[in-house]
Amino acid sequence: MIERKENKNIYGLSKISKWILTASFTALSFSFIAPYLLTKFSIIDFTETGEIGDTLGGIMNPFIALGGALLTYLAFYMQFKANKLQREQFDIQIENEKKQFREEIKEQNEQFLKSQFENQFYEMIRLHKENVSEISISLKSHYLSGGQSIYSDDKVSGREVFKYLLEEINLLYWITKEFFPKKSSNFLINMAYGVFFHGNNFDKKLESKGPNDKNHVDFINSLININVWHSHGNYKGLNQVVKRHTGFENAKELNFILFEGHSSHLAHYYRHLYQTVKFVANQDETKITYSEKRKYLRILRAQLSNQEQVLLFYNWKSGFGKNWENKTNRFFTDYRMIHNIYNDLLITDFNLIKLFNLEKESYYRKEPNRENDTLFEFQDW
């Protein structure tokens, strides 16, 4: 439609042009019959005006001159229109080129910003891997060789450490429950995680909150005694030591130093992991869509073992990492950062189905056009 309109503007004639052209042809045409009309019916006797040629010329010339003048004007007018149309087309072309240039610049800026985002994201993943590799514990062993006692420390580092850390916090939770049997699971995990994270300094943090009752004192003293007797027994017979000092009977054998805290490594580990997730989740969705954010965070989550995700869950549930999932941040629900955990990995007091209301209609975001986008992997089993 626009193209036909432009063609009409180029090749069509305006009303003024048509009027001038008609007047010109009328004047020229009249110039041929004017001598006959003016000499046949005129009251003037043209036989006295000179030669016939002079008479015809005198009569026709004004009309021919008028037609020529009109045609000349029309030619100038059409040229004016053509120049005006050419300027308009040139302006349109310039505007289109400006628009295309702006779009290209915008696209280049978006590509640059996305490239900048990806570079920072993958650098943060690299730093996360470094943080994981720096986490370590020493497994203690003792045996006799040639009548001599041999003591050795076997260093375990990286991702493998988390399965030992998980066993320690599980043990701490059940010991805590022995001393506070009527307390809620939230209270118990907060206490257990506090010792797990701060170790021997946690009794000071308890005092700062005012828990001076006998149960708290006995709880801390029992942990100190377990630590001492465990080391005296060359890190063997942990179940008997725990049973003697707490009453808990199902402790697994762990041959490393217990209850001295892991904040020196885990504090930095969790801070960086949190900042990485927040960096992706808070991106403007006009530049990085929700589906793209999920894609990047799947890459990050792939770096976390199941044990790491369980400890991340305890970090949040204990209140130490409460910002992982709250009214502002929905990193566990909308962004699925603990997607791979399931109930069998957790302390039995915690049930993911109840905690996240999985039996009710989903309240968390889902990727568009994705048929199954469950909160946890086990929901697809």
Image (tube, rainbow, N blue to C red):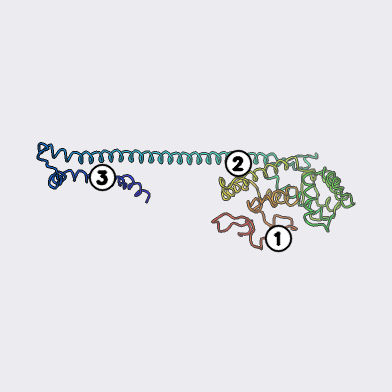
Q: Earlier in the sequence, mark 3 or mark 1?
A: 3
Mark 2 residue element: helix
Amino acid at dot 3: Leu
Q: Earlier in the sequence, mark 2 or mark 3?
A: 3
Disc 3 to disc 1, how far (Cα)?
89 Å
Residue at left offset 75%, top offset 47%: 320
Q: Which mark is residue 354?
A: 1
Disc 2 to disc 1, how far (Cα)?
34 Å
Question: Which marked residue is nearer to the observer: mark 2 or mark 3?
Answer: 3
Q: Position of residue 124 (x, y in %)?
A: 63, 40
Where's the C terminus, which quadrant? bottom right
Q: Earlier in the sequence, mark 2 or mark 1?
A: 2
> Are discs 2 and 1 less than 8 Å apart at CB?
no
> Are discs 2 and 3 less than 8 Å apart at CB?
no
Q: Residues within 10 Å of mark 3 (few under 14, many from 20)?
A: some
Q: Residues within 10 Å of mark 1 (few under 14, many from 20)?
A: few
Amino acid at dot 2: Phe
Q: Which residue is labeled 3 in the image?
A: 21
Q: Is residue 93 above or below residue 214?
A: above
Left or right: 153 with respect to 304?
Answer: right
Q: Residue furthest right?
A: 214
Q: Which residue is labeled 2 in the image?
A: 121
Q: Which mark is residue 288?
A: none
Amino acid at dot 1: Lys
State the residue in front, 319 or 363. 363
Q: Position of residue 160 (x, y in %)?
A: 68, 45
Residue at left offset 80%, top offset 40%: 149
Question: Which marked residue is nearer to the observer: mark 3 or mark 1?
Answer: 3
